[in-house]
Image: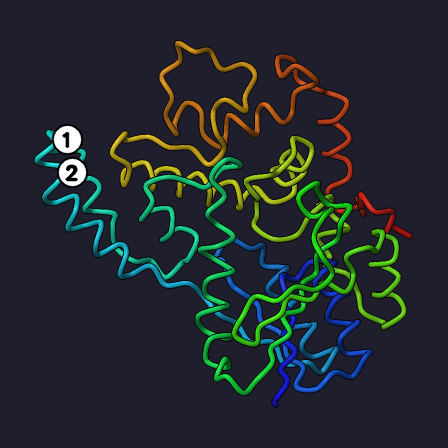
Amino acid sequence: MAEHNIVSMSGGKDSTATLLVARELEVPNLSAVFADTGHEHPATYDYVHYLAESTGVPIRWVKADFARQIAGKRKFIETKWREKGVPEAVVVGALEVLHPTGNPFLDMCLWKGRFPSTKARFCTDELKRNPIIEQVFLPLMDGNSMLLSWQGVRADESLDRRYLPECDEVGGGLFNYRPILKWPVEAVFEAHRAAGIKPNPLYLQGCNRVGCMPCIMCAKDELRELASRWPEEVARVREWERLVSLASKRGATTFFPAVNDPTVSSEDQISAATHGIDRMVEWANTSRGGRQFDMVNLIARADSQDSCSSAYGLCE
């Protein structure tokens, strides 16, 4: 029976440590897969290339394709929206933007007519899990192979992950394996150092997590740091809010739920223009309570744009 060992790579610290463990154990048929969401920082894309070169482990890139779903939504809008009395201007606006862009994250949101949220985290399944299963795992599941899916998951990251098993069987010869499940974060970076592998540079620039930029789970201090260092990422999300709002029957949707902003009133008219990414960045620069600008933090950020700012003590 053939054995395939495939590491799910995000470009973050935990998946990198997992790749290094698999390489150290010299498991057979080792490879990695990186699901490109279209919503990563350029440094992460560079880092994935760096890992392939530095470790000698081939990393395959896959992307989700939502062309079929977008075509289906166009047909639905052309008929059902008009039948339900949706204003013609809204119908026309949606049809104008509903075309595949080739960016998985944006195309997914255009199809859904909304952004993912903490209560509807369809992004992980649609952008990572499904394309990896469909494009990498299923072609290898021929009944004569065992696939070990190496996952960089640690128990201390969340309550949901605390009770995961180290290994479980999915079926069809596919198993999930989580070798660093019980590792503390210090051991993760020690694995980098021991192997002579640099961590993703974003960890030196104020990022607690590496992946979508920004992630829907982004904390207030992370958003403040991101907006200060990379305003182009904020500009991209701002444009996405405009496009996805046009593809929404409500005519408005925001990347972060407006209820995350403590200054929002129940009487407010919510739109991307009034409660979108720019308002959330403004709130991220306030002190606790969200109503007064934190001038100490603002000055400190302005003075440290080129300096190291690691939440994990990585700065020398």
Along the viewing direction, whichever of 139 and 166 lies nearer the viewer? 166
Residue 208: x, y in percent? 72, 45
The relative height of residue 41 versus residue 80 in the rendered view (above or below) is below
**At x 20% / y 47%, what residue is drawn?**
96
Of badges 2 and 1, nearer the viewer stands 1
Residue 110: x, y in percent? 33, 47
Residue 253: x, y in percent? 37, 32
Q: Which mark is residue 148?
A: none
Along the viewing direction, whichever of 266 and 174 lies nearer the viewer? 174
Q: Which residue is mark 1?
A: 86
Q: Which residue is mark 2?
A: 91
Q: Amino acid at mark 1?
A: Val
The relative height of residue 63 versus residue 29 in the rendered view (above or below) is above
**At x 77% / y 65%, what residue is drawn?**
179
SS for callout 2: helix
**At x 50% / y 33%, what residue is drawn?**
256
Between the residue at mark 2 and the residue at mark 1, the CA separation in whole angstroms equals: 7 Å
Q: Amino acid at mark 2?
A: Val
- Quarter-of-image position of residue 40: bottom right
**At x 56% / y 41%, what residue is drawn?**
231
Q: Residue furthest bottom?
A: 1
Query: Decide: marks 2, 1 in contact (CB < 8 A)?
Result: yes
2 or 1: tag closer to the N-terminus: 1
Instruction: Assess disc 1: are there few (<14), some (14-19) or many (≥20) residues with their C-alpha within 10 Å of its C-alpha.
Output: some
Along the viewing direction, whichever of 300 and 220 lies nearer the viewer? 220
Q: Is residue 312 left or right of residue 92?
A: right
The relative height of residue 27 versus residue 213 in the rendered view (above or below) is below
